[in-house]
Each structure stands twice: as structure tokens, then as C-alpha cells.
């Protein structure tokens, strides 16, 4: 089945482009020490705020650090936050959403209450608390972001399950005595994947931005760690004098988000069980 | 179970959610370091004055006593008094709520309007330039931070062209830039969702049947597709309200709007417990109502759904 | 011919005179009526809401406090003490008795006369219950001798009294009747002083509105305008975000900006509608170290830290030249200044660290001592400039083989964290223009409250501080502080980094702009 999906995926031109983009960024993150002209934190105060030039292709920041190197190393940080943060959110969200949607009743109410609490809870306060408990660091940001975001996946999963469990083929499976686990895995989950994947591909971009907002409020990645979000937020003071500080990390985020979206679209088509039945 | 019953249950659910939120907020605010009295009096104050103020505000009592006295007051709809601003929280909320509400409500409407239009266009004209540009817009929407977009819009429309004001509130002109900034990101996922679920639905058997019966493509999409495609979009509603509020925090800082978001941030940084609790309660209630609305709309759109 | 030429000269000369005189009349300031007609509303951007306008219960009453309230004594541009509500004063030879003679006819905005009774009430209430009780802690008794004469009897000589009395935002003179009348609400719903502006409203999180006091005629004698202010309404607008603040003045939505971020100065300077005003400041940004915790319990390690900062390069490049390198603990305008031994010298720092036993034995680029690696946490608040300096220091430490992790705290948490005593190194800023700030930060009595953040506890220092504050004359007081300052520099609990420059901006359509260290004086200000 996986081979079939992959095959389908690779037939779509857009998906392949998306895949290449994502792979390129993952490679960039992995090979950062090789690719980057310098280390991300190397300062050279004399070279502060230089426009893009031969020595510094994307210019320098207020410490004379090479923006190109920081964007490259930033892929490591931001992709890690985005992917692991999404994984946490997706894990919690799909799990809780699935039980809520399948069982309904009191379980559904409890999960709904949890979702409501998580959305009603101020993100900053949550981030403050987690950073206080776990200390500042990327793991705190990932957990904070995951805890902020899981509700979206929970509600999407629940919503799909609510509709799908009334479908004839699910009713039929149930009537034939299939276990709840089997029904969820074989029927409900595969048919709920499409909106989840679209949400996930957008969610990855969102999470990079949540980190930027946390940086805007001083709670993001701590210096000298080069996250794209922190670069955007720190660079805002130089918006009018040094555009290269925010434009390049911004473009990096945009390309990555585009990549994930193309892959997401392709995957959605490839996973579509109706298309498979054809 | 009928919808009415469901709504009643859902309203009853508000209470445990609100209690949960207050416990969490209260716990976290007291867990993280920070002392409102110190902030009120500043560093250069005597120990004596410090102790006296603490006692006067009742902050020297055990935590559970403070929490239950707070809960007791909330039950009588008494939100208490701000420690820092020395004003009834209810009055502060009433003053700021309209500013935040006008921002988020317009943001919600605009993001759904833009999102659905672009989503449908993209689905109908799949794999054309329209589809790609709608996707491009969505990508920009989700990858540009709001503070950045806000500053760019200000730079262009307020500083360079002098068309619109930066700061202030109350008039339509003051609302334009903040709402546009707020909605662009929000429109992105609505657009993507609409497109994707439309395409999803179009492939379903009954739509294929309709098409086979010779109905025109456009009609198929509007008559059969859109209604069913709305479900995942509606699911987003409660979430959107929560997010728009989160976004409003940044927007209110950038555009200098005195709203709940800015008040919340200030209150968190000042450890002004009653204000944080008050804003969170309002926010929680709105989110719950939003989610409830989403559930009811579900049932309206798709009569097969049972509760 | 000759006479014709003379006539021509005379005509030319007279013409020239006429041109000049007309130029002079043009250059002359417009009269009061014109100024007032042009000056309706002034909008001033500030960083944050005042905590409270009540200076008795709040240690700092916000920028607008100086407009609402006068002080007993004022300080002019040269920082010399001048008349305020008090016309003049005398001090007895033993420094224990002060006589203040008040200006006649000074009234609070609520109609209460500002007489000797009111002044005595202010001083005693502040001393007994005030948040800034230290201002008058030396005062034994305040007596109203007659309606225009106040006598202060001191417990010990206290030459710094005039400084304390002139601290705007701290030593504001407020109306006793209003204070009683409004109770808890004073400072929020009302604030009543004798100043050029009257409090109208405070919309929290947004703005404070003031309106002109039409009866004001007792301004300090060193101000040009001796009558009421020209602007009718003044709005202090709260603008927390630095970029928004810059754009507001560029778009003409505000007239004056307090605290412009250094990163934005060049943008505003390039704008012809905006005038940027740079002036020296009384603030110092420094890195403090906890002297009771390893590794900074070793004076050599602390001294090494003083050598790792390339202060000139930081100011020039990171801060865009907005500021001054700092080598000692007091702002340049504050006496006593000391020549500091600490320059930028990484070799010297390495030497000192090696002397203290810190070397890289296993070649992992981290120095260790007795098998323990040199790792520290550097605390900072979230203010951009401080985080920037922390980032530079972190990099410099890394060059010496020290691993420093930066941890940012929001302002509420930050102050509290110092009570725990867990701090190792931390970025701080203070703003004060008096040597007694050393006593404030290094007296052992303030360790528990988290004010003495380096946790310096030396009986000798405590004794000397006490001595300094009870010296009979300012000169003798300063000479004790000189010794203290020298000694502290040697003990190196702080690494001074830079003195921020004061950056304010105003619309170029304003005239009569006068400012001192702590305040923009609105009395002379008008719109052209």
C-alpha cells in the first residue's frame, strides 16, 4: 500500500517539486556545518549591519554575524520546532479527537472541554509556565507549541469521525463485528486523513510563526540560537534600515511552507481511498 | 438527541471548562515567579510598605483561600479589582471588549469571505493560474508574521501615503489596516480547506452521479459540493476565534489599539491576577460559544449527524 | 560726485539695516496669543503606563507627574539646584536645620493653598508611609513656622537632601486635601499638584490626558515662560512597540517621543519632519555577578570579566554610536568619577583566569578547574538592547572558553528572581544621578530583598556607606564615596558596559523644546 501511495505521489509534478523543496531544506539542516560559510554565532562587530556583498552574500546583522549562515543553521532549529511541535500536536490531537468522535457521549464532552480549555488559554501564559518548569530551550518551545496546537487536530478528527461513522460502509463493518480499533484504523482514520494533511501542511508554517510571535514577546529561542522566527522578530527594529535581516528568513519560511503544502496536496490525493478503489 | 438538548448540555459544559481555565490560570500565575506588589511599589521601597500593601490586597493569605474567595466572587459576577490599575475588572473589560470584538469579528468575517472565495475559485479552476495564485496567497498568508505584515502596511499606507491612520480606534478608517493584517493569515487556511474539501466532495459518488446526469460543473460544485465541503471549514470556527484573539494580541500592540489582548499581556507581565482571570474567562466563554455554534452548524449542514 | 556716493552708501546701509531688522522681527518668537492659538493638542509617546500617579504609594509616578506636580526644589539644565515651590533656602552650619521659604500664591489645582502646612504634610507623610520614604529618612521633624516658611530638623547632616527634593516623579508635592478625599482612588482617578498641567483622565493601557493650568505663574525662574503653558491639552500615549513609535512620529500622529530605540535613530534622522535629540544620560548598563557563588566568588574571575568587553566596538557597531563606553559605576555626569583600570584586553583576562586556576586541560575549548567546566547562566530581561549586550558578552566569554547560556525573563519575574539568590551573572540597567546609588546596590541590608543583586556583604562597605551619608558637607560626602567607588571597582562585582544615550524625538514644527535628564519641560513648548 505504501508503495502504491508513493507511486501515486511521484506521478504528480507538484508533489515532486514539494518533496524536492522539503528534502532540500532537510539536507540544508543536516549539512549546515558544511554549507554555511561560518558558524551561526560568529560575531565580527566591525562588520555589523553590512548590506549583502561578496563576503556576506545575505548581509550581516547587528553583531556582524553572517545572515546566510544563520538562515542555513536556522533551518535546523525552525524545522525541528515545526516538525516535532507538529508531531506532539498531531499525536495528542488525533488520539483525543478519535476517541471523542468514535465514542461520543461523555468522552466526547470531556475532550471538547479540554479543547475549549486549550484554546481559551493564553498562549503566552502557557509558554511562560512551560519555560519556567523545563527551563528555556527548544524543547520547551516545542512542547508549548504542541500544547497550543493540538486542539485543531482533535476537532478535525472528531468532526470527520462524527460524519464517517454514520456512513454505510462503517455501519456495515460494525455490523459484521469488527473491533473498534479495526474500524478506526481501517475505515475512519484513512478517510479523515485529507483534511488532517492539509491542516498539517499549513500547521507547520503556523508553528514556525508561533515561535516568531513568542520571540516577539521574548519567549522564543534564546540567543545565540538562530531560529527563523527569532531572526524575524529581532530584525523588526531594522525593518527600515536593514531589510535583509527579515526578508531572507521570511523567504526561507515561505519556501518551506510552500514545499510542505505541495507535498500535502499530493499526499492527500495519493491517500484518497476512493481514487484507490478506481 | 435533539439539537436543543445538545445545546443545553453544551452550555452546562461551560461551567467545568471555565473552572478548569481559572484553576490553570491561577496555578500558573502563582507558580511562575513575579510579584505584583513589588511591581506596584518598585525597587526603591521599604520592607514595611511592601508588607502593608501585601496585606491590604489579601495576597498574604494561603493560595487556596485566595482561589476560593475569587471563585466565590466570580459566582456573583464580581470580577474583583485590578491590583495594578486600581479599577474594577468588569469596568475594564467593558471598556476594552468593543475594541477587541470589532477587530476579531471583522477579522473573522473577512478571513472567511476571502478564504471561501479563493478556495472555491481554486477548486473550480484547478491547476490553472488562478489555483496557483490563490495557493501562493495562502502560502504568504501563513508564512508572514503578523507584526511584519502590520509594519509593512503601516509603512506604506500611513507613513508614505498618509491614507490611513496608524493608531486609534472607533472609526472604520482605524479598523482597515488592523483587520486586513489580521485576516490575511486567517484567510489562508480557510482557502486551503475550502479548496481541498471541495475537491474531496466532488469526487464522491453522489456528485459523480449528479455530473453523470448532465448537470453543469459549476452547478455541481455549488449545489452539492459546497454544502458538504463546509464541514471541515466550520470545524475551524471555534479554533479561529481562539486564534484571532491570539493574533489580536500582536495586532493590538502593533496598531496601538487598547483592547483585551494588550491588557492581557500587560496584566500577565504585571502579575495582575484579577485582570488575567477576567480576560481569560471572557475569552473562554467566546471560544466555547464558537465551538457550540460550529456544532450546531454541522447539524444544519449535514442532517445525518447525530449527537 | 562724492556726496552722491555717500548718499548711495547711506541708502544702501539703511536698506541693509531695514532688511536685517525685518529679519530680526521674523526671527523673534511670536507672542503668547499666537503661540497659544497654534498650540492646541500635544501628543507625547511613552513606553508604558505609569504604575500609578500617586507618588506617596508608588515609587515612580510616570513622566506626566512632573507636569501635574511641582517639586520643592528644581534642577536646571546644568543640574544646579534652583527654585521650585521654594523660593530659597538656608542650612545651618552643622547641617541639621534647613529653612525653606515658599513662593507666595502657589495653589493646588483643587484650590487648596500650597503653604508650609501642606509641604510639611508631604514630607512627613512620605517619610512615614511613602514608597520613597528614603527621600526624607534623615528628617526628624518638619515644622510650618509661618504660612511661607518650613523648617526641617534633621537627625544627622544630610547634604543630599536637595537632590532628593528635586527628584521629579518621586518628590512631587501633592494636595493633602485631594489625597484624603480620593483615598485609594488617588493616583488613578485623580492626581492633584501645583504644576502647569491638570489631570483630566487616565485610560489605562492607552493614554493620560492633561489640560493647561490657567493660573500657573510660579514656574522655576530658569524657564523662559513665567506664565501658564502654551499647549492647551497634552496627551501622553502609551506605545510599547519601538517600531510603531517611530512610525507614529513619522506619520505625524505624535509630536514627541520619549526613549527612541538606538536601532531606529538613523531612520528618524533621515526624516525632515522629525528632529532627533541626543543627550547624555544618567543610566548605566552593566553585567552583575553573584559574588557568593562559584565561579564568580573569585575576585580574579570577576576582574577577568571586566577585561573581555570591547566597549568602543559595542557602542559603535551594535548600538550604532548611540551611547558611551562605560568603565566605572557612575554615569559621566555624576561625581565622583574614577579612572578605571579595565580596558579591552583578552590576554589579560586569560591571564587572570589562569591565575585563578581556570585552563583548558582537555582541549575541548571549555576551560575547567578541578575537573569542573566553566558554565554559567547569564540572565537578562527581554529589552532588545540588553539582550544584544548579553549576546556579545556570551560570544566574548566563548572565546575564553566559557560556556554562557542566556536566559530571558519578563519584567515581573526578573525582579523576583534575585530574591532566590540563584543568579550567577545578569544584565541590568539603572538610572540615577547620585553617588548614593552605590549604597543602594551594595549595602548588605538589601540582599534579602533582591536589590543587592551581587549579594555583596562586606561590613567595611556598610560602615563606609553610613559614614558617607552622614558627612556634614557635600565635599566630604563625595570624598568618602570616592574611596568607596575605587574599592568597588577593585572588587569588580559589576562589569560596566555602556551608558545609553538619551534619545528623544520631536516633530520639527515644535519650538521652545527644553529638556533635562529626567523630563521634557512643557512650559516653553509651542507649535510654530
Image (cartoon, coloured by chain):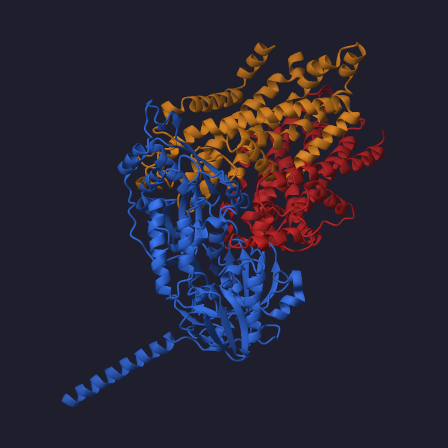
Chain colours: A orange, B red, C blue
Relative image position of residue B76 (x, y in whole percent): 78, 48
Does residue A243 appear in the picture of this structure? no
Q: Is residue A167 above or below residue B17?
A: above
Front-most of C381 and C359?
C359
Q: How many marks?
A: 0
Relative image position of residue C134 (x, y in whole percent): 50, 59
Relative image position of residue C382 (x, y in whole percent): 49, 43
Q: Residue C424, located in which quarter of the rendered image? A: top left
What residue is rendered at 76% in x and 34% in y?
A: B297
Does residue C57 appear in the picture of this structure? yes
Left or right placement of residue B12 versus residue B268 in this view: right
Q: Residue at the bottom extreme?
A: C3
Quadrant (top left, top right, bottom left, bottom right) of the N terminus of chain C: bottom left
Front-most of C405 and A172?
C405
Left or right placement of residue A67 versus residue C185 in this view: left
Relative image position of residue C200 (x, y in whole percent): 61, 66
Q: Is residue B67 above or below residue A77?
A: below
Q: Residue A173, located in which quarter of the rendered image? A: top right
Front-most of A14 and C29?
C29
What residue is rendered at 62% in x and 64% in y?
A: C190
Front-most of C263 and C350?
C350
Quadrant (top left, top right, bottom left, bottom right) of the C terminus of chain C: bottom left
Q: Residue B31, located in which quarter of the rendered image? A: top right
What residue is rendered at 17% in x and 86% in y?
A: C5
Amino acid at each position: 500500500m505504501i508503495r502504491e501511495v508513493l507511486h501515486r505521489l511521484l506521478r504528480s509534478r507538484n508533489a515532486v517539486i514539494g518533496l524536492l523543496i522539503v528534502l532540500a531544506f532537510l539536507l540544508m539542516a543536516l549539512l549546515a556545518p558544511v554549507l554555511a560559510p561560518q558558524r551561526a554565532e560568529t560575531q565580527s562587530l566591525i562588520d555589523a549591519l553590512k548590506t549583502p556583498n561578496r563576503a556576506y552574500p545575505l548581509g550581516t546583522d547587528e553583531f556582524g554575524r553572517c545572515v546566510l549562515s544563520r538562515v542555513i543553521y536556522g533551518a535546523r532549529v525552525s524545522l525541528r520546532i515545526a516538525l516535532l511541535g507538529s508531531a506532539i500536536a498531531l499525536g495528542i490531537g488525533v488520539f483525543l479527537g478519535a476517541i471523542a468522535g468514535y465514542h461520543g457521549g461523555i468522552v466526547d464532552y470531556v475532550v471538547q472541554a479540554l479543547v475549549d480549555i486549550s484554546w481559551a488559554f493564553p498562549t503566552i501564559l502557557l509558554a511562560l509556565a512551560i519555560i519556567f518548569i523545563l527551563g528555556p530551550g527548544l524543547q520547551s518551545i516545542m512542547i508549548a507549541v504542541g500544547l497550543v496546537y493540538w486542539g485543531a487536530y482533535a476537532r478535525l478528527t472528531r468532526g470527520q469521525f462524527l460524519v464517517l461513522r454514520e456512513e454505510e460502509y462503517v455501519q456495515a463493518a460494525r455490523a459484521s463485528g469488527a473491533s473498534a480499533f479495526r474500524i478506526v484504523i481501517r475505515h475512519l482514520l484513512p478517510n479523515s486523513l485529507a483534511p488532517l494533511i492539509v491542516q498539517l501542511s499549513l500547521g507547520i508554517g503556523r508553528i514556525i510563526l508561533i515561535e516568531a510571535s513568542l520571540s516577539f514577546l521574548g519567549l522564543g529561542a534564546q540567543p545565540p540560537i538562530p531560529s527563523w522566527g527569532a531572526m524575524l522578530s529581532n530584525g523588526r527594529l531594522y525593518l527600515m534600515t536593514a531589510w535583509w535581516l527579515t526578508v531572507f528568513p521570511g523567504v526561507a519560511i515561505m519556501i518551506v511552507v510552500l514545499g510542505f503544502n505541495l507535498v500535502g496536496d499530493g499526499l492527500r490525493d495519493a491517500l484518497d481511498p476512493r481514487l484507490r478503489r478506481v | 438527541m435533539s439539537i436543543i438538548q445538545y445545546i443545553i448540555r453544551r452550555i452546562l459544559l461551560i461551567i467545568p471548562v471555565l473552572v478548569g481555565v481559572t484553576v490553570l490560570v491561577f496555578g500558573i500565575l502563582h507558580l511562575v515567579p513575579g510579584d505584583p506588589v513589588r511591581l506596584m511599589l518598585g525597587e526603591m521601597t521599604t520592607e514595611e510598605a511592601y508588607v502593608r500593601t501585601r496585606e491590604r490586597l489579601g495576597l498574604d493569605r494561603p493560595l487556596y483561600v485566595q482561589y476560593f474567595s475569587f471563585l466565590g466572587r466570580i459566582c456573583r459576577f464580581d470580577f474583583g479589582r485590578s491590583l495594578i490599575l486600581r479599577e474594577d475588572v468588569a469596568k475594564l473589560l467593558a471598556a476594552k471588549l468593543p475594541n477587541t470584538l470589532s477587530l476579531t469579528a471583522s477579522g473573522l468575517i473577512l478571513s472567511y469571505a476571502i478564504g471561501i472565495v479563493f478556495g472555491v475559485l481554486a477548486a473550480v479552476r484547478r491547476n490553472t493560474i488562478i489555483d496557483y495564485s490563490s495557493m501562493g496567497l495562502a502560502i504568504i498568508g501563513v508564512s508572514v508574521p503578523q507584526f511584519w505584515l502590520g509594519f509593512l502596511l503601516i509603512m506604506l499606507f500611513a507613513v508614505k501615503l498618509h491614507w490611513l491612520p496608524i493608531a486609534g480606534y472607533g472609526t472604520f478608517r482605524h479598523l482597515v489596516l488592523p483587520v486586513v493584517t489580521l485576516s490575511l493569515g486567517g484567510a489562508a487556511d480557510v482557502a486551503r480547506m475550502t479548496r481541498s474539501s471541495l475537491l474531496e466532495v466532488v469526487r464522491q459518488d453522489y456528485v459523480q452521479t449528479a455530473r453523470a446526469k448532465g448537470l453543469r460543473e459549476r452547478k455541481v460544485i455549488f449545489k452539492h459540493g459546497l454544502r458538504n465541503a463546509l464541514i471541515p471549514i466550520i470545524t475551524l470556527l471555534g479554533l479561529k476565534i481562539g486564534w484571532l484573539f491570539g493574533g489580536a494580541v500582536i495586532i493590538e500592540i502593533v496598531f496601538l489599539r487598547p483592547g483585551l489582548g494588550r491588557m492581557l499581556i500587560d496584566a500577565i507581565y504585571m502579575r495582575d491576577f484579577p485582570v488575567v482571570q477576567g480576560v481569560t474567562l471572557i475569552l473562554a466563554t467566546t471560544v466555547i460559544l464558537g465551538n457550540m455554534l460550529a456544532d450546531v452548524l454541522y447539524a444544519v449542514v449535514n442532517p445525518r449527524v447525530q449527537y | 560726485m562724492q556726496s552722491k556716493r555717500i548718499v548711495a552708501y547711506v541708502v544702501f546701509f539703511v536698506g541693509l539695516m531695514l532688511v536685517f531688522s525685518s529679519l530680526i522681527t521674523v526671527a523673534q518668537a511670536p507672542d503668547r496669543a499666537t503661540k497659544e492659538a497654534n498650540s492646541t493638542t500635544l501628543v507625547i509617546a511613552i513606553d508604558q503606563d505609569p504604575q500609578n500617579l500617586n507618588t506617596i504609594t508608588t515609587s515612580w509616578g510616570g513622566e506626566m507627574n512632573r507636569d501635574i506636580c511641582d517639586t520643592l526644589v528644581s534642577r536646571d539644565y546644568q543640574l544646579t539646584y534652583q527654585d521650585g515651590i521654594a523660593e530659597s533656602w538656608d542650612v545651618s552650619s552643622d547641617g541639621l536645620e534647613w529653612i525653606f521659604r515658599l513662593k507666595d500664591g502657589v495653589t493646588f489645582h483643587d484650590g487648596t493653598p500650597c503653604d508650609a502646612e501642606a509641604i510639611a504634610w508631604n514630607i512627613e507623610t512620605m517619610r512615614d508611609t511613602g514608597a520613597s520614604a528614603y527621600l526624607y529618612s534623615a528628617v526628624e521633624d518638619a515644622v510650618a513656622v509661618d504660612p511661607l516658611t518650613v523648617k526641617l530638623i534633621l537627625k544627622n547632616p544630610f547634604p543630599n537632601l536637595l537632590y532628593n527634593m528635586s527628584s521629579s516623579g518621586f518628590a512631587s508635592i501633592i494636595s493633602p486635601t485631594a489625597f484624603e478625599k480620593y483615598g485609594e482612588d488617588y493616583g488613578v482617578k485623580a492626581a492633584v499638584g501645583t504644576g502647569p498641567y491638570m489631570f483630566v483622565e487616565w485610560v489605562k493601557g492607552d493614554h493620560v490626558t492633561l489640560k493647561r493650568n490657567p493660573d500657573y505663574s510660579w514656574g522655576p525662574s530658569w524657564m523662559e515662560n513665567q506664565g501658564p503653558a502654551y499647549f492647551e491639552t497634552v496627551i501622553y500615549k502609551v506605545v510599547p512597540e519601538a517600531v510603531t513609535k517611530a512610525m507614529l512620529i513619522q506619520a505625524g500622529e505624535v509630536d514627541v517621543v520619549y526613549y527612541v530605540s538606538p536601532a531606529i535613530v538613523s531612520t528618524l534622522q533621515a526624516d525632515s519632519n522629525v528632529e532627533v535629540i541626543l543627550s547624555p544620560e544618567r543610566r548605566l548598563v552593566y553585567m552583575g555577578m553573584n559574588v557568593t557563588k562559584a565561579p564568580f566568588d573569585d575576585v580574579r574571575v570577576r576582574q577577568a570579566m571586566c577585561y573581555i568587553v570591547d566597549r568602543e566596538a559595542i557602542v559603535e557597531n551594535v548600538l550604532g554610536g548611540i551611547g558611551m563606553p562605560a568603565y566605572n559605576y557612575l554615569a559621566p555626569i555624576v561625581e565622583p568619577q574614577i579612572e578605571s583600570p579595565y580596558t579591552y584586553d583578552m590576554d589579560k583576562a586569560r591571564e587572570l583566569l589562569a591565575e585563578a586556576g581556570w585552563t583548558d586541560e582537555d582541549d575541548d575549548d571549555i576551560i575547567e578547574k578541578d575537573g569542573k567546566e566553566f558554565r554559567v547562566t547569564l540572565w537578562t530581561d527581554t529589552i532588545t538592547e540588553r539582550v544584544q549586550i548579553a549576546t556579545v558578552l556570551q560570544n566574548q566569554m566563548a572565546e575564553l572558553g566559557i560556556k554562557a547560556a542566556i536566559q530571558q525573563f519578563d519584567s515581573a519575574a526578573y525582579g523576583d528572581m534575585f530574591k532566590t539568590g540563584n543568579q550567577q551573572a545578569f544584565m541590568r540597567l539603572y538610572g540615577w544621578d547620585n553617588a548614593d546609588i552605590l549604597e543602594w546596590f551594595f549595602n548588605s541590608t538589601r540582599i534579602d530583598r533582591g536589590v543587592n543583586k551581587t549579594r555583596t556583604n562586606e561590613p567595611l562597605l556598610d560602615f563606609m556607606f553610613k559614614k558617607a551619608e552622614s558627612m556634614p558637607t557635600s565635599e566630604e560626602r563625595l570624598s568618602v564615596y570616592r574611596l568607596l567607588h575605587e574599592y568597588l571597582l577593585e572588587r569588580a562585582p559589576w562589569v560596566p558596559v555602556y551608558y545609553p544615550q538619551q534619545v528623544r524625538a520631536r516633530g520639527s514644527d515644535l519650538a521652545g523644546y527644553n529638556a533635562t535628564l529626567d523630563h521634557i519641560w512643557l512650559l516653553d513648548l509651542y507649535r510654530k
